């Protein structure tokens, strides 16, 4: 249970920090942090979260990472479903706390997109479903390559959270205009419940693409860097 609770807390922190920066600070009058600030916030939540809780649960905080590591033989299948459930609960609780906070602003009129992911009219840059699918698969694949490589027993010890956090920052810098960046089905699910858009109807893509991309990335890493007996 310690592992599952750590995943819940870590995913809460990721969504609260990353999506919270988008909802509360990205376009704040005169002091907005913009896309770059949101990208950095997501990277920092993972970096700090993995350092804080990685020794307890591995610091996945993302169903796609759990599935990718399982597919790559790095994660026990008996923990897979409980991890995913814990991650989705953590993400949803974080979104709920953010929802309560935003209602306290003077003149509150609604949540709008609430940092949710989407394509077409729900894409920040109005990118198509095909564009959204491709970019989420590609960035998720590279994310798993970084995760697999940084946590490989042959890699320098102690630096994995930095590499993973910086990778997530870069991923957001690339893909926020296209999908608002998912690479994490739990993150997408939590905020979609509170968005005033059709985010829930497009949620399928942000489960399918990151998970498929994670599997592809794991396969690529195992070909490029096979583990020797």
Image (spheres, rainbow, N blue to C red):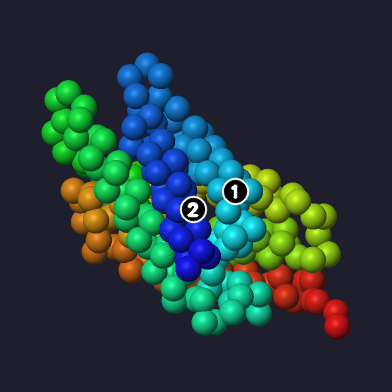
Mark 1 neighbour density, 10 Å: few (under 14) some (14–19) many (20 or more): some
Q: Which quadrant of the structure image shows residue 92?
A: bottom left
Q: Secondary structure at mark 1?
A: helix
Q: Position of residue 29 (x, y in %)?
A: 33, 19
In three-dimensional space, the C-alpha distance between marks 1 and 2, rounded to whole angstroms, equals: 9 Å
- Residue 62 visible in this rendered orientation of the protein: no
Q: Position of residue 121 (x, y in %)?
A: 26, 50
Image vertical order of residue 181 relative to residue 66, above or below = above
Q: Residue at x 70, y 53 (%)?
A: 160
What residue does disc 1 label? 52
Counting residues from the N terminus, which is met first, the one under dot 1 or under dot 2?
A: 2
Image vertical order of residue 73 relative to residue 132, above or below = below
Q: Are dots 1 and 2 in contact, CB under 8 Å?
A: yes
Quadrant where the C terminus lies? bottom right
The residue closer to the viewer here, 195 or 155, is 155
What residue does disc 2 label? 10
Image vertical order of residue 197 relative to residue 221, above or below = above
Instruction: Kindly identify which numbered label has been placed on residue 98.
Output: none
**Residue furthest out toward the top:** 30
Q: Secondary structure at mark 2?
A: helix
The residue closer to the viewer here, 107 or 92, is 92
Q: Residue at x 68, y 65 (%)?
A: 148
**Residue furthest out toward the front:** 1
The residue closer to the viewer here, 110 or 180, is 110
Q: Residue at x 79, y 55 (%)?
A: 157
Q: Position of residue 185 (x, y in %)?
A: 41, 63
């Amino acid at each position: 249970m310690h592992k599952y609770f750590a995943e819940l807390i870590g995913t809460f922190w990721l969504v609260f920090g990353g999506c919270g920066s988008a909802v509360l600070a990205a376009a704040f009058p005169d002091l907005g942090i913009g896309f770059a600030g949101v990208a950095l916030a997501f990277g920092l939540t993972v970096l700090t979260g993995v350092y804080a809780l990685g020794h307890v649960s591995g610091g996945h905080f993302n169903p796609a990472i759990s599935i990718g590591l399982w597919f790559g033989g790095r994660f026990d299948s008996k923990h897979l479903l409980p991890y995913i459930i814990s991650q989705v609960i953590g993400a949803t609780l974080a979104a709920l706390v953010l929802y309560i906070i935003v209602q306290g602003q003077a003149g509150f009129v609604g949540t709008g997109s609430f940092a949710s992911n989407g394509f077409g009219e729900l894409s920040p840059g109005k990118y198509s479903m095909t564009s959204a699918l491709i970019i989420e698969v590609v960035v998720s694949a590279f994310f798993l390559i970084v995760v697999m490589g940084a946590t490989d027993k042959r890699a320098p010890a102690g630096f994995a959270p930095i590499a993973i956090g910086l990778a997530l920052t870069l991923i957001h810098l690339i893909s926020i205009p296209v999908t608002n960046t998912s690479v994490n089905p739990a993150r997408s699910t939590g905020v979609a419940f509170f968005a005033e858009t059709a985010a829930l109807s497009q949620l399928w893509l942000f489960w399918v693409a990151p998970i498929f991309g994670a599997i592809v990335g794991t396969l690529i890493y195992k070909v490029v860097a096979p583990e020797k007996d």
